[in-house]
Image (cartoon, coloured by chain):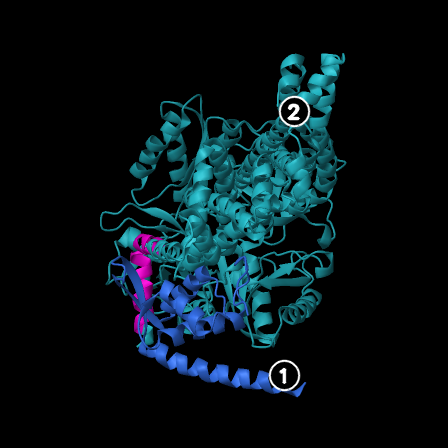
Chain colours: A cyan, B blue
């Protein structure tokens, strides 16, 4: 029954609190009245009776409070009161509050967003069965001790590894670089899709089961088997409108019929370090790969996925496979056979490229948050200082120290909570933005705000609130109560003390800002270097698109006719200034390579030159504006049996023929047993904007086993508008042929520099916020000091100090924390920039111009921030200043 | 014996608080009464030895009410004014017995120690 009473009281106290308050007052006053009446009856005067009653009763206000504090919810009530007081105090200083909340919200929002990304991309385990045991294996040119290389693997080595390794449950080949032409069927347009080849057990190795249909079985993965394909959920929904009876149907890939055996689950996205996010269809490796590929140690087309046996370690397996690979190298000493093996966890393999940038960004956001906290702390300290006397009086009257601290903490908690809520909104927006900005980032699909992120936000809010609140709460020294009370408004000692605290905060703020600025400067410089990189040809107003002719329908002679018709018609289009065909355009990727020897001066196999192979139609060089340096370009009738002539790049000429004239010499490719006579030398072009140029050989397009080509079009203006007419030309020639990768070279470069742009602009943004906050801090502290010193300055002026001298004194006073912070910050930067070394392109980590610029910028901003208060101080009217209280 | 220190600023110790609770419960056993009457009764019965600082009754009364040992009702007092009358609940009666027993044990023990010396 007692709990019923208690419950009743609880409800009563919650709902009828105001009424209970009046009742309590009534109750107490009834008591006093009775006592007074009794005293009067005992013969006292009215006044005496009242005093005596109060004496025996005690302090009614205090007792009232004590009685109230026994009620249920009283702790909640006092928190509510603190919140009310805090909110009112904040409301009374709206500019302070808004600035503090804005600053905090930025800091918290950036941190929540970055934490969400880091968690989603780097920390969450891969969505497979027992992901800790999944590894990726590669080959390497050098031993692990010299820094492992992660190069693709040849199928023969894979088969040897599969036979001889012991620590692995199962392993599978994956080749995510493939693609197919999907034929037009049922009124759909033809299209070119990215595809992957894999061993039949790849999906069972991961533990992924198709959403509908079945996975591959060993029988599918043989050269004689009937053709099968697994399609992804996006492809199924996009092209087949989620047709539930897709399994068993036939699709035409490169003009061959394939049976769809299943659809992969919607959450499955393949993302490895060699890309593959856009793969739409998977086919069995051994069925697809030509026999020549399956029987070589020298063609590296696969990545190996493996599942460790329970208890086996990555290191153990890699060292075992390395010794297998070394034996292979001994037995087959071909120049393209790799002597070592390497490996890493599948998660590392997926996110390796993102780790450093993401952690750097996270570090930058933590710096910003820290600066934001210090700014808010600085503002609160200033307010505490202004309220010093009030606090001292309250302490003297018996206000508990904890109670006063709680009030201050409540203010910072209110600021941080509001900022946190806004911050989550900001983070959410930022993440949406990221999804659009970087759709190709691996694992971006697993970036989500979930309860762990919310918990993180909550902890961040609590830490920030405690940090900034506690600093200001401790800045009030209860021990110096008397001196605070005695402190006249003219003495400056106490305020100096608190200004010291704010100054130390400023020094840290400025040094963090310097570190951020240095990082941003380096990244920005690196980004500009990257943007400014010359592909080797003018890139404005150029358009490229790729077509691939299925072997089934296009025999070599038909191919040549088709390409000639195509390029003639494209050149005839209005707006096309020049056009040509090439297998892979500059800046658009690796495009195939092979080891080359010189017929006239044979080399040792290990000295063979690895050259990029390009096929071109003679008009390409003029269209791309690649200058001819020596000799001539091959002509259009040099094709098929007469087509064994080639043009090499300047770098290839230097490396193959350091002393003699290359014209008339022959390059030999041992892998295909073909010789090419060199007829000309052209300038170098880059295959990837991030990478150095590579020796390149251009062969005639017709009759050299190339079945695809990139149409390269140059125009005088508005080249994008030519895409449609060119696609129409292709469609008229073959309605079953898709054009893919339709983009300008400008877009190609934008795309490959987007990461660098993203990182550098983000860090720059953070650095600017930090700079602004530091400037605001400098300004605030100096203004405060000048106000405190008004009378002192007045006296100095009255005694004859020159205005310029005062200006200098005050200015230097304000600049001191900035200078100290700058020195500390530059020192810290020297260590911090090591973190971003791997992100820099053609930029030294200790670039003196960047560091110099950072120092200048910071000094200029600090100077501006201090100039205004200093100038105001020097303009003081001495009479006015002396009268100021 | 002072049950509460004179200023009434500090919080009463556990022992003192427990004693005050016991006194209130015991006082309320025969009939319901308001705060002033409780104070008077304690003073009167103890032969003016226990100088209860009258006001400090109220925090104790409110606490006991919150805990469900006593309940309160507003009704007309002997002067005709509305007053808050407290009375024991069933749980309060049980609590009184427990606390009385406790008190007896404690005071007996203290007596033993004191008479020993």
Residue bearing the label numbered 1: B114
A698 or A246: which is nearer to us? Answer: A246
Q: Is residue A179 left or right of residue A7?
A: right
Q: What span is colored magenta in the figure? A: A4-25
- Mark 1 vs mark 2: tell me if same chain: no
- Mark 1 in CB contact with mark 2 (< 8 angstroms): no
Q: How many marks?
A: 2
Per the rendering, the mark at residue B19 is: none
User: Is residue A8 highlighted in magenta?
Assistant: yes
A367 or A173: which is nearer to us? Answer: A367
Our reading of the magenta stretch's main secondary structure is helix
Residue A190 at x, y percent in the picture: 31, 46
Q: Could you tell me which residue is drawn at 66 percent across and 20 percent down? A: A870
> What is the residue that sits farthest to the front in this orientation?
A43
Q: Residue A640, relative to residue A49: is it above or below? A: above
Q: Is residue A171 left or right of residue A838?
A: left
Residue bearing the label numbered 2: A786
Q: Is residue A447 left or right of residue A612?
A: left
| Distance (Cα) linking label 1 and label 2 | 70 Å
Residue A369 at x, y percent in the picture: 56, 43
Q: Residue A138, relative to residue A745: is it above or below? A: below
A794 or A180: which is nearer to us? Answer: A794
A50 or A849: which is nearer to us? Answer: A50
Q: Which mark lies nearer to you, 1 or 2?
A: 1
**Secondary-structure class at tag 1:** helix
User: Is residue A624 highlighted in magenta?
Assistant: no
Subunit ID for the residue under disc 1 = B
Q: Residue B100, relative to residue A597: is it above or below? A: below
Residue A471 at x, y percent in the picture: 61, 45
Residue A672 at x, y percent in the picture: 58, 53
Q: Could you tell me which residue is drawn at 63 percent across and 86 percent down? A: B115
**Secondary-structure class at tag 2:** helix
């Amino acid at each position: 029954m007692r709990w019923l009473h208690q419950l009743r009281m609880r409800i009563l106290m919650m709902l009828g609190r105001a009424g209970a308050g009046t009742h309590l007052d009534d109750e107490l006053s009834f008591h006093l009245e009775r006592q007074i009446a009794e005293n009067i009856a005992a013969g006292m005067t009215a006044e005496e009776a009242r005093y005596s009653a109060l004496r025996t009763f005690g302090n009614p206000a205090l007792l009232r409070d004590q009685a109230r504090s026994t009620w249920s919810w009283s702790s909640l009530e006092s928190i509510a009161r603190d919140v009310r007081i805090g909110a009112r105090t904040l409301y009374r200083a709206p500019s302070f509050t808004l600035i503090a909340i804005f600053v905090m919200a930025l800091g918290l929002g950036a941190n929540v967003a970055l934490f969400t990304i880091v968690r989603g991309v780097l920390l969450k385990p891969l969505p497979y069965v027992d992901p800790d045991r999944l590894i990726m294996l590669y080959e390497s040119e050098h031993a692990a001790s010299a820094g492992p290389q992660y190069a693709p693997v040849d199928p023969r080595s894979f088969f040897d590894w599969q036979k001889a390794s012991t620590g692995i449950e199962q392993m599978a080949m994956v080749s995510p670089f493939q693609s197919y032409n999907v034929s037009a069927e049922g009124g759909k347009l033809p299209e070119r899709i990215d595809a992957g080849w894999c061993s039949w057990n790849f999906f069972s190795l991961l533990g992924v089961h198709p959403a509908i249909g079945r996975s591959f079985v060993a029988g599918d993965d043989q050269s004689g088997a009937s053709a099968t394909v697994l399609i992804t959920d996006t492809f199924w929904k996009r092209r087949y409108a989620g047709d539930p009876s897709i399994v068993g149907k036939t699709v035409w890939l490169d003009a061959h019929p394939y049976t769809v055996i299943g659809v992969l689950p919607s959450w499955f996205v393949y993302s490895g370090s060699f890309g593959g996010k856009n793969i739409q269809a998977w086919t069995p490796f051994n069925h697809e790969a030509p026999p020549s590929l399956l029987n070589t140690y020298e063609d590296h087309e696969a990545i190996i996925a493996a599942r460790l046996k329970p208890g086996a370690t990555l290191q153990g397996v890699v060292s075992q496979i390395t010794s297998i690979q070394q034996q292979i190298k001994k037995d087959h000493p071909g120049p393209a056979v790799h002597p070592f093996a390497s490996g890493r966890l599948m998660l590392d393999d997926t996110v390796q490229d993102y780790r450093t940038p993401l952690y750097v960004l996270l570090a930058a956001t933590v710096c910003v948050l820290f600066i934001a906290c210090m700014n808010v702390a600085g503002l609160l300290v200033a307010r505490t200082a202004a309220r010093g006397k009030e606090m001292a009086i309250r302490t003297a009257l018996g206000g508990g120290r904890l109670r006063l601290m709680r009030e201050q903490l409540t203010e910072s908690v209110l600021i941080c909570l509001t900022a946190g809520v806004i911050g989550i909104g900001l983070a959410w927006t930022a993440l949406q933005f990221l999804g659009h900005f970087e759709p190709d980032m691996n694992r971006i699909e697993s970036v989500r705000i979930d309860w762990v992120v919310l918990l993180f936000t909550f902890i961040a809010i609590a830490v920030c609130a405690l940090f900034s609140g506690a600093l200001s709460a401790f800045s009030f020294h209860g021990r110096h109560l008397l001196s605070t009370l005695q402190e006249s408004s003219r003495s400056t000692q106490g305020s100096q003390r608190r200004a010291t605290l704010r100054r130390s905060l400023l020094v840290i703020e400025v040094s963090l800002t310097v570190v951020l600025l240095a990082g941003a400067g380096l990244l920005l410089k690196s980004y500009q270097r990257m943007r400014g990189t010359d592909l080797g040809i003018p890139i404005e107003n150029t358009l490229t698109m790729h077509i691939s002719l299925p072997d089934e329908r296009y025999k070599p002679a038909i191919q040549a006719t088709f390409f000639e018709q195509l390029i003639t018609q494209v050149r005839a289009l209005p707006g096309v200034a020049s056009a040509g065909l090439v297998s892979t355009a500059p800046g658009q990727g690796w495009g195939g390579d092979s080891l080359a020897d010189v017929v006239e001066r044979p080399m040792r196999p290990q000295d063979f030159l690895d050259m990029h192979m390009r096929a071109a139609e003679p008009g390409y060089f003029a269209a791309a504006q690649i200058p001819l340096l020596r000799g001539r370009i091959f002509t259009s009738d040099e094709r098929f049996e007469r087509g064994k002539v080639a043009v090499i790049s300047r770098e290839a000429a230097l490396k193959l023929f350091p002393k003699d004239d290359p014209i008339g010499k022959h390059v030999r490719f041992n892998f295909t047993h073909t010789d090419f006579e060199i007829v000309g030398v052209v300038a170098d072009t880059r295959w990837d904007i991030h990478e150095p140029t590579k020796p390149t050989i251009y062969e005639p397009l017709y009759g050299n086993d190339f079945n695809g080509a990139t149409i390269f079009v140059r125009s005088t203006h508005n080249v994008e508008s030519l895409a449609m007419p060119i696609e129409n030309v292709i469609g008229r020639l073959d309605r079953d042929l898709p054009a893919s990768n339709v983009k300008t070279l400008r877009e190609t470069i934008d795309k490959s520099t987007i990461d660098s742009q993203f990182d550098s602009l983000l860090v720059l943004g953070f650095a600017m916020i930090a700079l602004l906050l530091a400037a605001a801090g400098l300004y605030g502290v100096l203004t405060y000091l000048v106000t405190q010193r008004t009378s002192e300055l007045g006296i100095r002026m009255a005694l004859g100090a020159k205005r310029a001298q005062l200006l200098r004194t005050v200015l230097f006073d304000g600049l001191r924390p900035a200078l100290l912070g700058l020195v500390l910050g530059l020192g810290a930067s020297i260590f911090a920039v090591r973190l971003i070394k791997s992100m820099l392109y053609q930029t030294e980590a200790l670039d003196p111009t960047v560091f110099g610029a950072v120092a200048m910028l910071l000094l200029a901003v600090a100077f501006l921030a201090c100039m205004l208060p200093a100038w105001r101080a020097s303009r003081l009217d001495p009479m006015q200043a002396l009268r100021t209280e | 014996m002072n049950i509460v220190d004179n200023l009434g600023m500090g919080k009463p110790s556990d022992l003192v608080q427990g004693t005050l609770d016991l006194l209130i419960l015991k006082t309320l056993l025969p009939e319901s009464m308001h705060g002033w009457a409780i104070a008077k009764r304690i003073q009167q019965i103890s032969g003016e030895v226990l100088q209860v600082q009258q006001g400090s009754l109220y925090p104790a009364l409110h606490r006991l009410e919150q805990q469900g040992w006593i309940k309160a009702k507003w009704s007309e007092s002997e002067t005709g004014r509305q007053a808050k009358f407290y009375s024991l609940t069933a749980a309060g009666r049980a609590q009184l017995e427990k606390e009385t027993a406790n008190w007896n044990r404690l005071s007996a023990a203290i007596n033993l120690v004191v008479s020993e010396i």
